[in-house]
Amino acid sequence: MTILVVEDDPNVLAFIDRLLTQRGHTVLAAGDPDHARFVLTEHGTPPDLLLLDIVLPGSNGLDFARAAKTANPSLKIIFMTGLVHRAPAVQRSGLGPVIHKPFTSEELFKVIDSQ
């Protein structure tokens, strides 16, 4: 599975990239929505899954996810957040589940496998 991960914390991004790569996924990594758009253009084909932080520089994850879903209706989306108060609005969007940071590899794999 090809997974686009959009996360502004480089340590969290590297952790997720390592976990997903070790599990056999192709990971496209970006630190913000603008970089994610560039990565998608360079990759040429849409990812199967979008895993992204809710709070991102220059934009918010929900807006980026809506645009990505419009461009690719079959895209599966999982949100991440360390700010619990942000989760309800994203959950109401119906675009995908929210996983709370910090999370374990088992928690991450469980939510990915449920998609």
Image: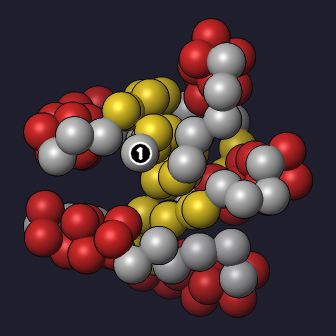
- Determine the image quadrant of residue 100: bottom left
Q: Nearer the viewer, residue 75 or 31?
A: 75
Q: Quadrant of the N terminus?
A: top left
Which residue is the site of mark 1? 1
Q: Residue 19's x, y, as percent?
A: 16, 45
Left or right, residue 52 beside residue 113: right
Q: Is residue 89 visible?
A: no
The kind of residue tagged 1 is Met
Residue beneath the point at 23% across and 66% down: 109
Q: Residue 39's x, y, as percent?
A: 58, 19
- When the figure is inspected, residue 70 is found, relative to residue 77, above or below; the finding is above
Q: Residue 80's x, y, as percent?
A: 42, 63
Q: Secondary structure at mark 1?
A: loop
Left or right, residue 31 beside residue 108: right
Total numbered labels: 1
Left or right, residue 32 beside residue 31: right
- When the figure is inspected, residue 96 is found, relative to residue 6, above or below; the finding is below
Residue beneath the point at 85% across and 45% down: 71
